[in-house]
Image (tube, helix red, strand yellow):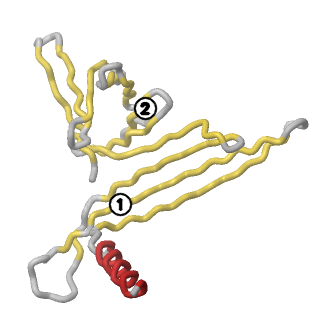
């Protein structure tokens, strides 16, 4: 009787896992270095984890064809780096991608907030968190206020003193 119940639960679990329509790959690279300064050896471990996720969609989902072609969908790449000395993490960074005006930007975490890099400029902007859950957004020529909306997009609001108006830019999260 126990075996029958166990088989039913395993088959239900396998059926639920089969319903996921995502292509996910994960790669982890660990580098361990031992530093000996003469008195005590110290071990430094660097772990880089890259996760790639892509939704699977079919071109002709409603057709009765058995073998259907896949529709190209955007890929979301998240990279996380952890550096630890003697087992204690000292630095964690990760990145995600956003688009604005048909340009792809990479948001990288650092110790104080985020750093944005563009294809032309690796230090395009910096983002620092304020006490009321908004962010200070600073580029070479302006300082603005930003926030993450409910969809995960980053919205930047800037004041133009020449026209006395507010402008809004949206970095759309790449799915």
Q: Which residue is mark 1?
A: 53
Above or below residue 89? Residue 64 is below
Q: Outermost residue toward the right?
A: 38
Question: Within 10 Å of the Cα at label 2, are there few (<14), some (14-19), or many (20+) other Cα atoms?
Answer: few
At a point 40% along the width and 59% down the height, the residue shown is: 52
Counting from the top left corner in percent of width and height, residue 49 is at: 51, 54
Of the pair 12 and 21, the residue shown nearer to us:
12
Badge number at residue 123? 2
Q: Is residue 88 left or right of residue 74?
A: right
* Front residue of 107 and 44: 44
Image height check: is 12 above or below 4? Answer: above
Asked whether 68 or 7 is in front, the reply is 7
Left or right, 118 with respect to 158, comes to right
Bin the neighbour count of mark 1 within 10 Å (Cα to Cα): few under 14, some 14-19, many 20 and up. some
Q: Position of residue 151 (x, y in %)?
A: 21, 43
Q: Quadrant of the N terminus?
A: bottom left
Answer with mark 2 or mark 1, whichever residue precedes in sequence. 1
Which mark's residue is nearer the viewer, 2 or 1?
Answer: 1
Q: Residue placed at 35% from the left, 78% from the top?
A: 9
The number of numbered badges drawn on the structure is 2
Residue at 19% across, 89% down:
66
């Amino acid at each position: 009787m126990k075996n029958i119940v166990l088989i039913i639960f395993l088959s239900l679990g396998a059926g639920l896992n089969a319903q996921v329509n995502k292509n996910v790959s994960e790669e982890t690279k660990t580098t361990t270095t031992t530093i000996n300064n003469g008195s005590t050896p110290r071990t430094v471990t660097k772990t880089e984890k890259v996760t790639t996720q892509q939704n699977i969609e079919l071109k002709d989902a409603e057709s009765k064809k058995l073998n259907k072609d896949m529709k190209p969908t955007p890929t979301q790449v998240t990279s996380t780096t952890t550096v630890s000395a003697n087992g204690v993490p000292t630095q964690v960074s990760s990145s995600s991608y956003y688009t604005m005006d048909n340009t792809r930007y990479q948001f990288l975490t650092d110790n104080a907030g985020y750093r944005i890099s563009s294809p032309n400029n690796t230090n395009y902007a910096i983002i620092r968190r304020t006490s009321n859950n908004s962010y200070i957004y600073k580029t070479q020529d302006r300082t603005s206020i930003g926030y993450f909306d409910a969809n995960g997009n980053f919205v930047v609001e800037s004041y133009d003193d020449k026209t006395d108006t507010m402008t809004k830019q949206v970095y759309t999260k790449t799915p």
